[in-house]
Image (cartoon, rainbow, N blue to C red):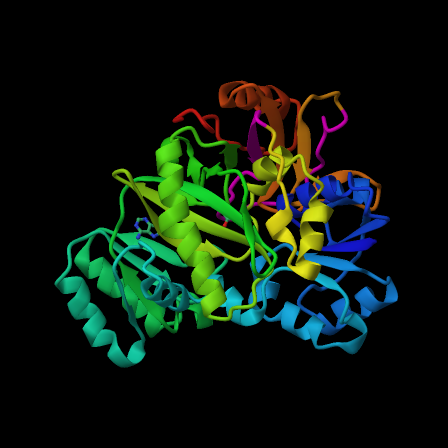
């Protein structure tokens, strides 16, 4: 079967690396991909938001399966569009339909979903410019810190955590009246601040049944000791040592089961990965957010732990046959450390040549923001550049290996966190 992966990050590179190992995959394409995917399969230069072009490529290349990596095309309805095309009626699409993708595309939708299905989450209220005065009152009458969330997609930047009442009101005004996050902040969810350790939980569903994938912990802040600005993620580890059997059961009973029940009862057409961002408050799990895709860089530690053929897993979508499916998980720990461009997540320069990639290594380099220049050299082309993933008998061993290997990679102004996983 010919397979196309949509996206260009580390997540898509690890998906390509894994799918490439499947005997069921006769040819693999990634659109638009990066230098890492170009080395193992064929990149297609394609604007993934031009749905018509995506359709044409699928038909032209006789693609049998498409995996939609990032959230934006899912929230934009790529699945719905493709499935409406007669020539594509047999194609297997990994990723939910538009209505289901609202679980990530609208914080308000996700909150209502959780409320309806009794899923533990922070208390909240939503505001628009029409009731902004009520928003000010809400801030006035509730304790700090205030968590202000743009309702729509804002490339991971739409959440503000503010301590001061007046600043919270100013930010609310910026978001609602001055379009701080554009269309995404036409509605703002203000929620109770929850304090605890965060972790990422992943499910794969065929539309009816589901399997849980290994847990992971992501390191979102740019600086050591979780200081500084939020990023897409600076590193990750799996498994997560503070997830005991007892805590895992709570996650399953209180979060995963009711989420799946809500999806089925709400007739949300969902086939693909569900990523539940969790926070451990005391001994109990709460949902911070739903994402309708794999996490990045979590994918770079979760996918390498899946021993089962990923194409077989995706094929269960065809006949809802996941209930008989056994997922085999590698018991080893996996860690990834992300090398980023100096200045990221704020302004940074691109186009620097990357060296050291051909050194012999036990680790795996998953490319994110890289491309091949006209001389055939690999250069930086984004904020997050390369994730260095390693296996180990425990997470400490895996992390140590990644730190040895990341030292071999050189490009101007390279930066990475030196403390990934050290809190565990
Ligand atoms: P989100 O985009 O919803 O994942 O939020 C981004 C980050 O903001 C999360 O990873 C948390 O670190 C933080 N966050 C979001 N909601 C809350 C909350 N209710 N309490 C504390 N921190 C939060
Ligand atoms: N690493 C967090 C995310 O993928 O949203």
* Relative side of 177 to 376, left or right: left
- Which region is colored magenta? 331-358
* Relative side of 281 to 275, left or right: left
Residue 6, quarter of picture: bottom right
Please state which of residues 87 and 406 is positioned toward the viewer in this rendering: 87
User: Which residue is pictured at 34% across the width and 55% down the height?
Assistant: 160
Asked if one can make out residue 274 in the rendered structure from this viewpoint, the answer is yes
Query: Residue 258: horizontal and vertical position, in percent?
Result: 40, 57
- Inspect the magenta stretch and tell me whether residue 355 lies in it: yes
Image: 209 above or below 414: below
* Relative side of 267 to 5, left or right: left
Asked if one can make out residue 157 in the rendered structure from this viewpoint, the answer is no
Report the residue that reaches farthest toward the front.
324
User: Which residue is pictured at 53% across the width and 38% down the height?
Assistant: 214
User: Which residue is pictured at 80% across the width and 60% down the height?
Assistant: 64
Query: Residue 290: horizontal and vertical position, in percent?
Result: 45, 56
Magenta stretch, overall SS: loop
Report the residue that reaches farthest toward the left.
141
User: Which residue is pictured at 50% across the width and 71% down the height?
Assistant: 267
Image: 16 above or below 408: below
Please state which of residues 362 and 269 is positioned toward the viewer in this rendering: 269
Image: 41 above or below 110: above
* Relative side of 157 to 75, left or right: left
């Amino acid at each position: 079967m010919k397979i196309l992966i949509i996206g260009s990050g580390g997540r898509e590179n690890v998906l390509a690396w894994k799918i490439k190992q499947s005997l069921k995959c006769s040819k693999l394409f990634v659109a638009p991909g990066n230098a890492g995917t170009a080395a193992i399969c064929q990149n297609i230069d394609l604007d993934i938001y031009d749905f018509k072009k995506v359709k044409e490529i699928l038909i032209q290349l006789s693609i049998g399966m498409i995996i939609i990596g990032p959230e934006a095309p899912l929230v934009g309805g790529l699945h719905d569009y493709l499935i409406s095309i007669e020539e594509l009626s047999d194609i297997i699409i990994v990723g939910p339909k538009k209505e289901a993708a609202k679980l990530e595309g609208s914080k308000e939708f996700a909150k209502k979903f959780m409320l309806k299905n009794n899923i533990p989450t922070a208390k909240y209220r939503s505001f628009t410019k029409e009731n902004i005065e009520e928003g000010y009152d809400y801030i006035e009458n509730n304790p700090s810190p205030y968590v202000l969330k743009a309702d729509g997609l804002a490339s991971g930047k739409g959440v503000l955590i503010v301590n001061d009442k007046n600043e919270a009101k100013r930010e609310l005004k910026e978001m609602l009246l001055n379009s701080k996050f554009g269309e995404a902040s036409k509605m703002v969810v203000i929620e109770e601040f929850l304090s605890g350790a965060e972790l990422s939980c992943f499910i794969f569903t065929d539309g009816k049944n589901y399997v849980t994938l290994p847990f992971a912990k992501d390191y979102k802040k740019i600086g050591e000791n979780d200081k500084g600005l939020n990023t897409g993620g600076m590193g990750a580890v799996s498994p997560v040592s503070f997830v005991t059997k007892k805590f895992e059961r709570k996650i399953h009973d209180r979060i995963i089961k009711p989420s799946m029940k809500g999806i089925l009862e709400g007739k949300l057409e969902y086939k693909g990965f569900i990523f539940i961002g969790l926070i451990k408050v005391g001994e109990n799990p709460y949902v911070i957010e739903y994402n309708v895709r794999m996490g990045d860089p979590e994918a770079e530690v979760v996918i390498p732990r899946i021993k089962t053929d990923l194409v077989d897993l995706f094929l269960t979508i065809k006949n809802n046959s996941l209930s008989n499916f056994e997922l085999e998980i590698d018991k080893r720990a996996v860690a990834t450390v992300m090398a980023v461009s100096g200045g990221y997540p704020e302004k940074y320069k691109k186009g620097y040549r990357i060296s050291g990639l051909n050194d012999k290594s036990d680790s795996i380099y998953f490319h994110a923001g890289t491309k091949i220049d006209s001389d055939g050299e690999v250069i930086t082309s984004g904020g997050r550049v390369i994730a260095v993933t390693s296996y180990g008998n425990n997470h400490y061993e895996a992390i140590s290996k990644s730190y040895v290997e990341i030292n071999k990679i050189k490009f101007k102004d390279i930066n990475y966190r030196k403390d990934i996983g050290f809190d565990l």
